[in-house]
Amino acid sequence: MNLTAAAEVDGVRFDGVDLFLSLPHTDIDSSDDDLALLADKIAAKNLRAGSLVAPVWPATGGGSAMGDDAECRRFLAQVEKACRIGRKLRDLKIRHYGVVRIDSAASAAEWAKDPEANTKRIAKTFREACTIAEDFGERLAAEGEICWAGMHSWRRNVQLLEMVGRPQTLGFQADMAHTMLFTMGYNAPEDRLLPDPFDWADADALAAAYRKMAGALRPWTIDFHVAQNDGTVKGSGSHDKTGHHCQPMDPNGKLDIVRDAGAWMRGDDGQPTRAFPHICWDGCMFPNSVMLDPKTWRDVLQVMIAVRNAHGWTNEMTVAG
């Protein structure tokens, strides 16, 4: 956080931080006193808290959203704890925007054993999570990532969101690196939008596929991560085959970050949607050596400023990690 607060490009700094609600980061079981201390630390660096990540996975105390009753109760308990923290941080005047991020906390492989029944089960759990969020004045954002059951393709994400049917409470969280994998058909070859094999030199084809994918999910998008991807996957365990984030200036990056951010930030009419009050860069995929290098933050901030300038954005920029 020290480097985040200190990073500056042409007089512009980061506005805030998104929070991962699991130790060794922010404890999901933080007391009111703990949260007051956290708010003081964030405010002392002239930052705000933005979106929150609910630790809904079994390894962090949650459970599968398509699991048995006990697993779903654990999932929902983590959502409730996250929403309580969100409201408390608002009460402390350190959080003025942002969502609570969730996913299905189950693998695409498990989902594939009974796709329709499992999607219905996830939708039911998500609807119950919406009711909890509404009680705390929060909104939920379902993270589009290829490792999560029922959320592993752009088409399946749309299906799930429509099945939940609570657009005022549940939306989509679009990370540019994760969602690029949708166009490549990882874990869902039937929904692939790029030819296989694909010539990465064909920038127009990539841009068109990316726009098509984003166009389907944009009406649901309420949280957005600027990111880069080199066209490969990584991960293990619960996060198997997830998007491989690159640093924004990585020469192997396949996205034109500024151009492709517009697929999410502008509607079909070309006008900025302003559907989310802040944009974020997710640093959780990088080793500490990268995170402790001041150049990392300056590069990230430079790209985020370029995205903001290109798409008429005047609101805030945060970093997660």
Image (cartoon, grey):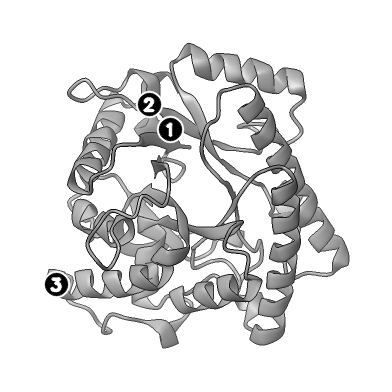
The residue sitting at 39% across, 27% down in the picture is 15
The residue sitting at 58% across, 14% down in the picture is 40
Q: Are the two marked residues, 1 and 2, in contact with CB atoms closer than 8 angstroms?
A: yes
Q: CA distance from mark 1 to mark 2?
A: 6 Å
Locate residue 36: give its quadrant. Answer: top right
Q: Nearer the viewer, residue 66 or 259?
A: 259
Q: Nearer the viewer, residue 269 or 25?
A: 269
Q: Helix, strand or loop at disc 2?
A: loop
Marking on residue 204: 3
Locate residue 303: give its quadrant. Answer: top left
Residue 279 placement (x, y as % from top left)? 38, 43
In front of the other: label 2 or label 3? 3
Residue at numbered disc 1: 288
Q: Is residue 230 above or below residue 66?
A: above
Marking on residue 71: none
Q: CA distance from mark 2 to mark 3?
A: 36 Å
Q: Is residue 283 above or below residue 112?
A: above
The residue sitting at 67% across, 43% down in the picture is 137
**Nearest to N terminus: mark 2 or mark 3:** 3
Q: Helix, strand or loop at disc 3?
A: helix
Q: Is residue 305 above or below residue 186?
A: above
Q: Helix, strand or loop at disc 1?
A: helix
Amino acid type indicated by mark 1: Asn
Q: Is residue 283 above or below residue 70?
A: above
**Nearest to N terminus: mark 3 or mark 1:** 3
Relative placement, left or right, of 98 versus 196 is: right
Amino acid type indicated by mark 2: Leu
Locate residue 256: give its quadrant. Answer: bottom left
Relative placement, left or right, of 7 versus 57 is: left
